[in-house]
Image: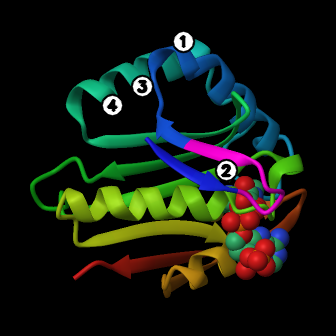
Amino acid sequence: LANYILKNGKPLVVRNASVGDAETIVAVVSQVTSEVVYLLWDPTYYNVEVERNYIARANEKQNILILVAEEEGRIVGVGELKIGDFRKNKHIADLGIAVVNEFRRLGVGTSLMKEMILWARKNRLEKICLSVFSTNKGAFSLYERFDFAVEAVRRRQFKLNGVYVDEILMAKFLN
Ligand SMILES: CC(C)(COP(=O)(O)OP(=O)(O)OC[C@H]1O[C@@H](n2cnc3c(N)ncnc32)[C@H](O)[C@@H]1OP(=O)(O)O)[C@@H](O)C(=O)NCCC(=O)NCCS
């Protein structure tokens, strides 16, 4: 559990997700996926039942960190770090992050990033990886601020509303 102060002066709590948060997490992610231009998932890709099982398994196995950011008891952002499943990639983790529209540019994303990086260091991970649409300037600059560097570009990897965008793969080494 960690406490932050947002740019609007309000306190933000970043904590581990529990199974009881599944419904709200799905609502938050669904809201962001419905904006289309930020996340790969189709809005109907998953549901509360799937998320409940996912959180339960993550908390039991400790191979996935699922964080929620709460402002006045309302979950306004989620972050996830997933450690590689195999001996050959268990030194890396994949990162995902989403903040609800009305709460962007207040520091929620920054708070989630800080906590995910702390957890990665605590777990002696060596590298954090992520994927971002080339058109997602906001996320890209957040990642640059945390010293993520571009590793590769997969051209025309996605189509957003019929328009091709590139996939940018970024990574941060922790050692
Ligand atoms: C990307 C995202 C997680 C950033 O979260 P956030 O809470 O808005 O980030 P912060 O307020 O902590 O921003 C920190 C810095 O990142 C950069 N940044 C964030 N959003 C930006 C934007 N839209 N345009 C330009 N820079 C941006 C800025 O440098 C910002 O600092 P500043 O506000 O002092 O200028 C959020 O915009 C979001 O959820 N977007 C939709 C989902 C998404 O794109 N997820 C990532 C998919 S790869």
Say if mark 3 contacts mark 4, CB within 8 Å: yes
Label 3 to label 4: alpha-carbon separation? 5 Å
Q: Residue at x 48, y 38 (%)?
A: 15
Q: Cβ–Cβ below 8 Å for labels 2 and 1?
A: no
Q: Secondary structure at mark 3?
A: helix
Please give the range of residues in magenta: 6-13
Farthest-out residue, left: 87
160 or 133, which lies in front?
Answer: 133
User: Can you say which quadrant of the picture contains the C terminus?
Assistant: bottom left
Is residue 7 located in the magenta-colored stretch of the structure? yes
**Viewer can see residue 51:** yes
Q: Residue at x 22, y 47 (%)?
A: 85
Tag on residue 98? Answer: 2
Could you tell me if the residues under marks 3 and 1 are in contact, i.e. CB atoms within 8 Å?
Answer: no
Q: Which callout, 4 or 1, points at the residue further toward the start of the chain?
A: 1
User: In this figure, what is the number of numbered marks?
Assistant: 4
Residue pictured at 54% horizontal, 12% vertical: 49
**Residue behind label 2 places its C-beta within 8 angstroms of ligand 1:** yes
Rendered image quadrant of residue 155: bottom right
Out of 148 and 10, give the one closest to the viewer.
10
- N-terminal of the two: label 3 or label 2? 3
Q: CA distance from mark 4 to mark 1?
A: 14 Å
* Mark nearer the N terminus (2 vs 1): 1
The reply to whether residue 137 is visible in this rendering is no
Tell me which secondary structure the magenta stretch mostly adopts. Answer: loop
Tag shown at residue 55: 3
Q: Which mark is residue 7?
A: none
Disc ID at residue 49? 1
Callout 3 amino acid: Ile
Label pair 3/2, CB-CB below 8 angstroms:
no
Q: Quadrant holding ligand 1? A: bottom right
Disc 4: residue Cβ within 8 A of ligand 1's nearest atom:
no
